[in-house]
């Protein structure tokens, strides 16, 4: 216990533990973002997180809860609007992403009593990770991993071919909803690590890197987790030794791994 | 002893504008092969999606044999190259065992592709893998949307032969869409000529002399199914409406046969 306490008592180890916990779920969910071409969608949800923070302060809710709730609400709005087909999906995403971000910023500015470190939310505040944050991350990660494990075959089948999945009796709509909920949750917990503007990078760079090395969907997921964890460790070390901002350093080290793998492995394996 | 698999009664599907599928009645029994032909935009895919239960119908009723297992071969299999996937894994996502999947591949003649990546398949191989995937589920009903798409002409004849042989072996019902009119005529029990409504339907030998068929596919096609160039007596304008070159009655007065 004393050992665990010593680790949890040190801000660097707390940051590392938190980062690794996020990489654990960013890997599989990042694969779905890459497979389903949802990078822009992820970005939009992440941008809406700032609106969630503003609403959290306004109604004095726990911030993680407010962020996850806002992401879920926005995801649902997106699904409904995309179905009505009045605008192309990317246009719709562009409108909602930046409007949510802007509304969040404007709302925060109306609350002078709330003193927030804006750059912490935009780019992450990994080194300020509290024990409470760690609880959120590992609680969220456990929930997501259980959901992924139980829904895996359906999620994969619906990703490969939605109509085939439907004919074979998978509840495609509910699976999509579950995926949205998981995205919202991972954004709420990953914000602490890399911030609103860099979350998508933490999702897609390790997954895209893993694609070059994997032959099966499951191998790609596992590799994405490992690469994400390497990126977190590398980024934190960089931050420790070079005194660089932690969140961006994690993304830089993920990118370095991406360039390295694509430079060495010229052909995808399958 | 015939066993009914699917019955469509007065089924209509309408998006915005005129119905895409207009008052269709259709029954498919176990052991039947029914082929749907018709010009582009005739509602063929919409009709079979209704049969599959993945297209909401506007009116009418669809009865399916309870617990009937459906094997579906979709028209387009566009796979994301970002998703690494072997044929084995793709087939096993049906939930069937590796043995069953390998046997299904053997039935469609491509068991050498078991370990191959789905991203390296040719058009013909892809269709056979899709067919095998449908077979692995031991279907009561096989639904095929243009199964010979992207297959060369020799391969097409072989594929239709295979579908017939599989029907004999599995004793399942088959409903398929095809553009390969001359090949279909030899491989099917019943043909339905669709142009929103059923223009005409019947046995292949009779249908080529049916006035409605000739009206939809043109005299040349009807007289010589061997050279099928997909000529029509009408075209579709930019809104998808039929532009008749025949008198205004067009197809409609033939009603449902």
Image (tube, grey):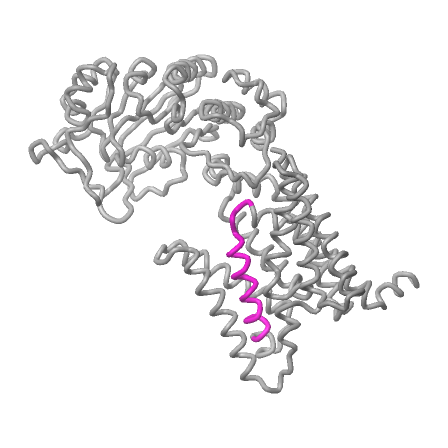
The quadrant of the picture occupied by the N terminus of chain B is top left
Q: Residue furthest right?
A: A2
Please tell me whether residue B226 is drawn above or below residue A32 in the rendered image: above
Measuring 61% from the left and 44% from the top, which residue is drawn there? A151
The quadrant of the picture occupied by the C terminus of chain B is top left
Q: Is residue B175 magenta?
A: no
Give the magenta part as a residue range. A35-54
Q: Residue furthest left?
A: B247
Q: Is residue A46 magenta?
A: yes
Q: Residue furthest bottom?
A: A113
Measuring 59% from the left and 72% from the top, which residue is drawn there? A53
Q: Main secondary structure of the magenta part?
A: helix
Please tell me whether residue A19 is drawn above or below residue A36 in the rendered image: below
Please tell me whether residue B152 is drawn above or below residue A6 in the rendered image: above
Measuring 18% from the left and 18% from the top, which residue is drawn there? B222
x and y, in percent, of residue A253 in the image = 70, 56
Left or right side of B28 for B85: right
x and y, in percent, of residue A202 in the image = 64, 56
Residue B204 vs residue A238, the one in the foreground: A238
**Residue A189 shows in this picture:** yes
In terms of image quadrants, where is residue A109? bottom right
Left or right side of A219 for B121: left
x and y, in percent, of residue B234 in the image = 16, 32
Please tell me whether residue A88 is drawn above or below residue B38 in the rendered image: below
x and y, in percent, of residue B77 in the image = 46, 34
**Number of marks:** 0
In terms of image quadrants, where is residue A3? bottom right
In terms of image quadrants, where is residue A219? top right
Left or right side of B115 for B31: left
**Residue B10 shows in this picture:** no
């Amino acid at each position: 216990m004393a050992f665990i306490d010593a680790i949890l008592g040190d801000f660097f180890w707390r940051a590392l533990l938190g980062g690794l916990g996020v990489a654990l779920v960013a890997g599989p969910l990042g694969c779905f973002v890459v497979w389903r071409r949802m990078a822009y969608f992820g970005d939009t949800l992440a941008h809406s997180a700032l609106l969630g923070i503003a609403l959290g302060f306004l109604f004095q809710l726990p911030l993680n809860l407010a962020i996850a709730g806002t992401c879920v609400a926005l995801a649902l709005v997106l699904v409904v609007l995309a179905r009505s087909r009045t605008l192309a999906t990317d246009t719709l995403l562009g409108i909602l992403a930046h409007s949510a971000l802007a509304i969040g910023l404007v709302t925060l500015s109306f609350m002078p009593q709330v003193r927030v470190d804006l750059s912490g939310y935009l780019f992450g505040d990994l080194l300020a990770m509290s024990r409470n944050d760690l609880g959120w991350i590992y609680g969220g990660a456990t929930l997501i991993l259980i959901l992924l494990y139980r829904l895996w075959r359906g999620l994969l089948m619906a990703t490969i071919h939605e109509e085939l999945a439907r004919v074979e009796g998978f509840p495609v709509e509910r699976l999509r909803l579950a995926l949205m909920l998981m995205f919202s949750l991972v954004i709420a917990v990953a914000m602490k690590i890399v911030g609103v503007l860099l979350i998508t990078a933490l999702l897609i760079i390790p997954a895209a890197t893993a694609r070059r090395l994997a032959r099966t969907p499951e191998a790609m997921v596992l590799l994405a987790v490992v690469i994400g964890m390497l990126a977190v460790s590398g980024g934190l070390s960089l931050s420790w030794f070079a005194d660089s901002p932690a969140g961006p350093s994690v993304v830089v080290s993920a990118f370095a791994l991406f360039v390295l793998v694509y430079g060495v492995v010229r052909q995808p394996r399958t | 002893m015939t066993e009914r698999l699917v019955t469509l009664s007065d089924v209509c599907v309408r998006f915005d504008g005129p119905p895409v599928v207009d008052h269709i009645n259709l029954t498919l029994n176990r052991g039947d092969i029914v082929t749907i032909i018709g010009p582009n935009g005739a509602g063929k895919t919409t009709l079979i999606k209704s049969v599959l239960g993945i297209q909401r119908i506007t009116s009418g009723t669809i009865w399916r044999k309870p617990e009937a297992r459906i094997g579906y071969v979709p028209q387009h299999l566009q796979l994301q190259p970002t998703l690494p996937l072997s044929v084995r894994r793709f087939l096993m996502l049906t939930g069937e065992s590796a043995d069953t999947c390998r046997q299904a591949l053997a039935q469609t003649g491509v068991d050498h592709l078991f370990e191959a990546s789905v991203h390296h398949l040719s058009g013909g191989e892809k269709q056979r893998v899709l067919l095998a995937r449908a077979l692995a589920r031991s279907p009561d009903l096989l639904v095929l949307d243009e199964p010979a798409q992207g297959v060369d002409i020799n391969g097409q004849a072989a594929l239709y032969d295979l579908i017939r042989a599989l029907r004999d072996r599995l004793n399942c019902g088959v409903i398929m869409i095809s553009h390969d009119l001359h090949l279909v005529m030899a491989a099917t029990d019943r043909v339905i000529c669709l142009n929103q409504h059923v223009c005409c339907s019947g046995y292949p030998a009779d249908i080529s002399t049916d006035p409605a068929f000739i009206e939809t596919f043109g005299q040349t096609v009807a007289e010589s199914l061997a050279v099928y160039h997909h000529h029509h007596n009408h075209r579709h304008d930019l809104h998808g409406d039929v532009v008749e070159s025949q008198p205004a009655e067009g197809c409609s007065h033939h009603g449902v046969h």
